[in-house]
């Protein structure tokens, strides 16, 4: 079972690349982020023509998450995270597919920091950690997949000094990510490739892609029951270099 996460940076703008990737890689489940589209304008017909069914939590112009599956439609479990009723950002959706609980996550960026956006990021991470603890208690295979907007360690970035003031690398952001891991979640990509420098994001600016000036912010976190089924994990890096591609590369895990 191949489960992928892909921040498409605008589903309508990247639709040719998304359909191309689905056809070439044929993942069983895909978690999408940053749709930048309302539910009414998501290109459902194109996605279904590619062989996928989905559930969405869109938002016009920014944010937005979805989960696609090949064949049967995913069964929606939850949209959004509890704990902040006034939060209307479309950043979390959860489903059951083929006996696995899967969440698509688009964690807040948090810039500029310090400030209200960074405070919101940290509150959101606390809410995610609370939901993650509930999911662990189910004792079933669970995959928390998405754009976490957190670079976990200095080894996960091409140049730590280059992002020193960014919300993605602040001690508070990293501490919240460590608290998630400490619950018992396995970082699939780091587990399979502990010493490799495997980036998932390259900025459009500063010639970042040709210079390989990237970092790792897209993660697939596995519950113990899912980690027991871990076969492989990787990044479809080549897709980042294609014409009009997203600034993220698809990242995936294979479970038995």
Image: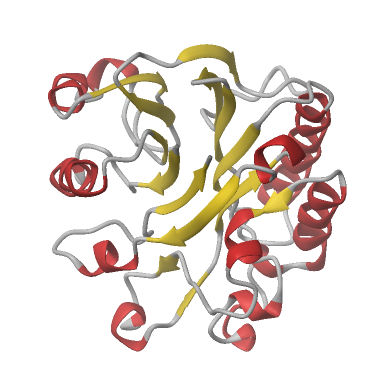
**In this picture, residue 166 sits left or right of residue 6:** right
Q: How many labels does the image show?
A: 0
> Most extreme residue toward the front, as rendered?
256
Quick check: 220 above or below 70?
below
Nearest the eye: 19 or 164: 19
Nearest the eye: 27 or 171: 27
Quick check: 105 above or below 207?
above
Quick check: 2 above or below 149?
above
- What's the image's color scheme? secondary structure
Give the percent coordinates (x, y) of residue 76: 51, 12
> Would you identify the image quadrant in which residue 209 lies?
bottom left
- Residue appearing at x 69%, y 79% in the figure: 154
Give the percent coordinates (x, y) of residue 225: 72, 35
Give the percent coordinates (x, y) of residue 50: 16, 29
Nearest the eye: 9 or 66: 66
> Would you identify the image quadrant in which residue 142 lies?
top right
Give the percent coordinates (x, y) of residue 103: 57, 31
- Residue appearing at x 43%, y 16% in the figure: 74
Q: In which quarter of the image is the N terminus?
A: top left
């Amino acid at each position: 079972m191949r489960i992928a996460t892909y921040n498409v940076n605008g589903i309508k703008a990247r639709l040719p690349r998304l359909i191309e990737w689905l056809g070439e890689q044929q993942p069983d489940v895909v978690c999408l982020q940053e749709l930048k589209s309302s539910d009414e304008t998501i290109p459902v017909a194109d996605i279904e023509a590619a062989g996928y069914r989905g559930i969405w939590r869109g938002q016009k112009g920014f944010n937005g998450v979805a989960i696609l599956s090949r064949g049967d439609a995913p069964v929606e479990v939850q949209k959004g995270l509890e704990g902040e009723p006034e939060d209307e950002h479309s950043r979390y959706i959860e489903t059951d597919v083929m006996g696995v609980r899967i969440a698509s996550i688009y964690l807040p960026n948090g810039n500029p920091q310090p400030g209200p956006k960074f405070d919101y990021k940290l509150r959101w991470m606390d809410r995610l950690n609370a939901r993650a603890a509930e999911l662990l208690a189910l004792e079933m295979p669970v995959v928390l997949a998405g754009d976490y907007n957190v670079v976990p360690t200095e080894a996960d970035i091409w140049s730590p000094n280059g992002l020193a003031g960014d919300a993605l690398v602040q001690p508070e952001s990293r501490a919240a990510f460590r608290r998630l891991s400490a619950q018992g979640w396995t970082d699939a990509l780091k587990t399979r490739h502990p010493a490799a420098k495997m980036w998932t994001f390259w900025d459009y600016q500063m010639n970042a892609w040709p210079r390989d000036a990237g970092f790792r912010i897209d993660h697939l976190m596995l519950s113990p029951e899912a980690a027991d089924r871990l076969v492989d994990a990787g990044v479809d890096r080549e897709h980042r270099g294609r014409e009009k591609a997203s600034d993220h590369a698809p990242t995936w895990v294979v479970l038995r």
